[in-house]
Amino acid sequence: MNALLPNLLAQATSLPSIAPEGGSAWMPPQASGHAAEVDAVFYFIYWVSVFFFVLIVALMVYFVLRYRRRVEGELPRLHSSHSLALEVTWTIIPLILVIVMFYVGFRGFMDLANPPGQAMDIYVTGQKWLWTFKYPNGHDDTELHVPIDTPVRLILASNDVIHSFYIPAFRIKKDAVPGRYNKMWFRPTRTGEYLALCSEFCGTQHSDMRARVVVHEPGLYEKWLTDVSDPFKTHTPAEVGALLVSRRCSGCHTVDGRAHVGPTFRGIFGHEVGIKGQPSVIVDENYIRESILTPSAKIVAGFENVMPTFKGQLKDQEITAIIEYLKTLSKSPEERSP
């Protein structure tokens, strides 16, 4: 078990650090059915803007040089004050361009807002500071796994503040708002690993609110979902607990003794901790369970009440697995050795 724990932790916490090939200076690679259309609209508006920026600046420089005052006291020459043809031209051309921009943008917006009827639903929940995904079979995970060339509809919600779920390679972004559901969809067209981010500032650990997005080859998604739905079949409770802690808790807690947003897990089990406004307690199974389900009941002294509840998100078996893993962190390296 001890040899497997580091591998499980590395697998769960590592995120794509190098963008897949195919991106440009402005955009990551296109990995969904929407990406090409979104990029086309972006570059159309971009190059129109560049053209008019260069044109206007060039005309400004020309007029400054052409009509500058050359002699002190020189009176300006009379020029035509009105040109109907010029005014019609600079009105009609921008109007046509704006209409085209509206049309292509609105067409893309309507496509993104209306998923096909056979889309697979995945529920996405944002909370400080992680994303969780609930799959059609009821499995909860902190990674988004999808099959290639399959429409996927994400149903977004938030447990605390406004977050914004963003996958740059798929060109999709939508707010997750407390008290309501928002929806968006995509069809992945390229296998590989991608990065999902929170693009709405949501607190001090906002930049750590990331998730891995994995697009599977045909048939491999179903195998992955079957394997992860019951990890207790192939791993011990402590190994499963290590995986859960790294996925669910690593944004606020460490296992190496360093304090973070919350107290470290190393050496905490079986030891006494000070509680804000209450007597000290011994960290045992009941205290850990209470801290997971009702985190505001006993706040460790020196830390703030910022932990969300995991009630309804973790099963009893998973809470037990986390407890078993924390027990291994309370032992010395010699005791943990086989």
Image (tube, helix red, strand yellow):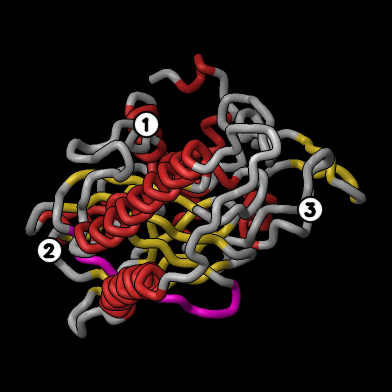
Identify the residue at the far bottom of this view.
117
Amino acid beneath label 2: Asp
- Place of residue 141 in the rendered image (x, y in percent of width and height, measured from the top left): 38, 56
Q: Residue at x 14, y 57 (%)?
A: 189
- In primary-sequence order, the first of circles 3 and 2 is 2
Question: Can you give x and y, in whole percent of width and height, for residue 338 in the image?
Answer: 38, 20
Q: Residue at x 35, y 35 (%)?
A: 8
User: For the magenta stretch, what is the residue range?
Assistant: 178-188
Q: CA distance from mark 2 to mark 1?
A: 29 Å
Contact, CB < 8 Å: mark 3 with mark 2? no
Q: Are marks 3 and 1 in contact (CB under 8 Å)?
A: no
Q: Which mark is residue 298?
A: 3
Q: Nearer the viewer, mark 2 or mark 1?
A: 2
The answer to whether residue 98 shows anywhere in this view is no
- Name the element at disc 3: loop
183 is within the stretch colored magenta: yes
The answer to whether residue 26 of the structure is visible from this angle is: yes
Picture quarter containing residue 170? Answer: bottom left
Residue matched to label 1: 10
Identify the image quadrant of residue 41.
bottom left
293 or 113: which is nearer to us?
Answer: 113
Q: Residue at x 60, y 38 (%)?
A: 69
Foreground disc of the pair 3, 1: 1
Label 3 vs label 2, nearer the camera: 2
| Contact between labelled residues 1 and 2, with CB atoms less than 8 Å apart | no
Mark 2 lies on residue: 149
Query: Could you tell whether 176 is left or right of 262 in the image?
Result: left
Residue at position x 43%, y 18% in the image: 337
Per the model, the C-alpha gap separating discs 3 and 1 is 31 Å
